[in-house]
Image (spheres, helix red, strand yellow):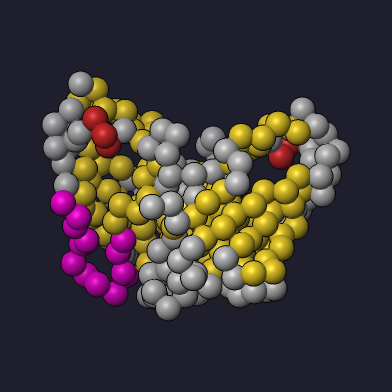
Amino acid sequence: AQTVTQSQPEMSVQEAETVTLSCTYDTSESDYYLFWYKQPPSRQMILVIRQEAYKQQNATENRFSVNFQKAAKSFSLKISDSQLGDAAMYFCAYKLGAQKLVFGQGTRLTINP
Amino acid sequence: DVKVTQSSRYLVKRTGEKVFLECVQDMDHENMFWYRQDPGLGLRLIYFSYDVKMKEKGDIPEGYSVSREKKERFSLILESASTNQTSMYLCASSFTASGANVLTFGAGSRLTVL
């Protein structure tokens, strides 16, 4: 069964510094999608960034970037210049089949002013 | 600008009650999903639907059923609520044709069963 593991239940970072959230996954597929979603306190879950497995280039969205290591089945999220608004639960997810997403356990990120 | 609407943000029910959680999307998405979110467990898929009147079980369907009579509406039903169903329930929708199948989520429904 495909699984997604986030080994860091909680992380904290000083405002303006860089933080990396870890995610590993297990799959026998060669082509797939990976995602990072953000859930701010009491607000809706939103997509942060996505990566197609066949693309070797790491995805980047402004201050958010990923380190995709396909052979190691690792998909970490780097947040640069952390801002107070980045405080949230972050979920790593893997697309299974045509529609389903499998999510990791989540990492709660705290930003210290 | 709300695109996925869950009818109730907070509900308190008693053990044995029948509970309906409603979800409506206005984006003409084919796929709709119900996830359950619990601390330390992340999001777990209960049921999903890829078309009207079609449904498939997710990872934890026991104790739940769903209904999709119209494309925009997907209901989650707890036939006889139990205390272990106290949780946050998230509805989401997506286009199949989008390839990446990016989910759009609702705000969530926090259910407490006493």
Q: Nearer the viewer, residue B34 or B39?
A: B34
Q: Residue furthest bottom?
A: B97
Question: At x 20% / y 55%, what residue is drawn?
Answer: A61
Against A26, residue B84 (above or below) is above
Whole-percent x, y for residue B60 in the image: 68, 53
Q: Nearer the viewer, residue B27 or A56?
A: B27
First to last magenta residue range: A50-62
Question: At x 26% / y 59%, what residue is drawn?
Answer: A68
**Image position of A113 (left or right of A50):** left
Q: Nearer the viewer, residue A100 or A31?
A: A100
Whole-percent x, y for residue B49 in the image: 62, 68
Question: At x 61% / y 75%, what residue is drawn?
Answer: B51
Q: Is A52 covered by the magenta stretch? A: yes
**Image position of B110 (left or right of A28):** right
Q: Nearer the viewer, residue A11 or B53?
A: B53
Whole-percent x, y for residue B52 in the image: 64, 74
